[in-house]
Image: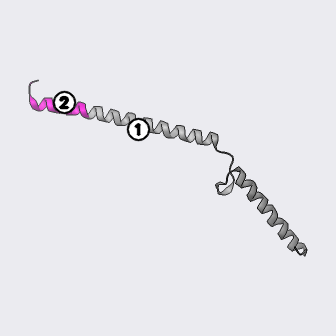
Amino acid sequence: MGEPTFVIAVTALVGLSVVVAAVLRAWHGWLALKRQELESRRARTPVEIEGGAAEGAARIEIADLKERIRKLEAIASGVDL
């Protein structure tokens, strides 16, 4: 066991194993963090409609579309606005 090359090889292998274990643990922690972020985002995000508009903006958009429909119906029926 006194051979210096053997000692260096074993030490390098142990060091590499420690580094790989630390990186693997960090990777699992990062994945857990991202999973938690996605779950919290799903829980607090209000219902959205097309284009990613939030609920308040969606109401404004729907009101705008209703107004456009009224104008188009008035044009179709021949009523001047």
What mark, if any, has residue 10 been given in the picture?
2
For residue 60, what is the image quadrant?
bottom right
What mark, if any, has residue 65 been given in the picture?
none
Q: Position of residue 2 (x, y in %)?
A: 9, 24
Q: How many labels sit on residues? A: 2
Decide: few, some or many residues near mark 2? Use Cα within 10 Å; few <14, some 14-19, many ≥20: few
Location of the C terminus (image quadrant): bottom right
For residue 4, what is the image quadrant?
top left
Judged left or right of residue 72, residue 58 is left
51 part of magenta stretch: no
Question: Which is nearer the N-term, disc 1 or disc 2?
Answer: 2
- Give the Cα distance between marks 1 and 2: 26 Å
Q: Position of residue 49 (x, y in %)?
A: 69, 53
Residue at x-position 11% and y-position 32%: 5
Front residue of 49/81: it is 81
Q: Which residues are magenta?
A: 1-15
Judged left or right of residue 78, residue 48 is left
Residue at x-position 33% and y-position 32%: 21
Q: Position of residue 11 (x, y in %)?
A: 19, 30
Q: Main secondary structure of the magenta part?
A: helix
Decide: few, some or many residues near mark 1? Use Cα within 10 Å; few <14, some 14-19, many ≥20: few
Circle 1 residue: 27
Amino acid type, label 1:
Trp
11 part of magenta stretch: yes
Residue at x-position 64% and y-position 41%: 44
Amino acid type, label 2:
Val
- CB of mark 1 within 8 Å of CB of mark 2? no
For residue 67, what is the image quadrant?
bottom right
Describe the element under mark 2 as helix, strand or loop: helix
Where 22 sits versus 79, above or below? above
Describe the element under mark 1 as helix, strand or loop: helix
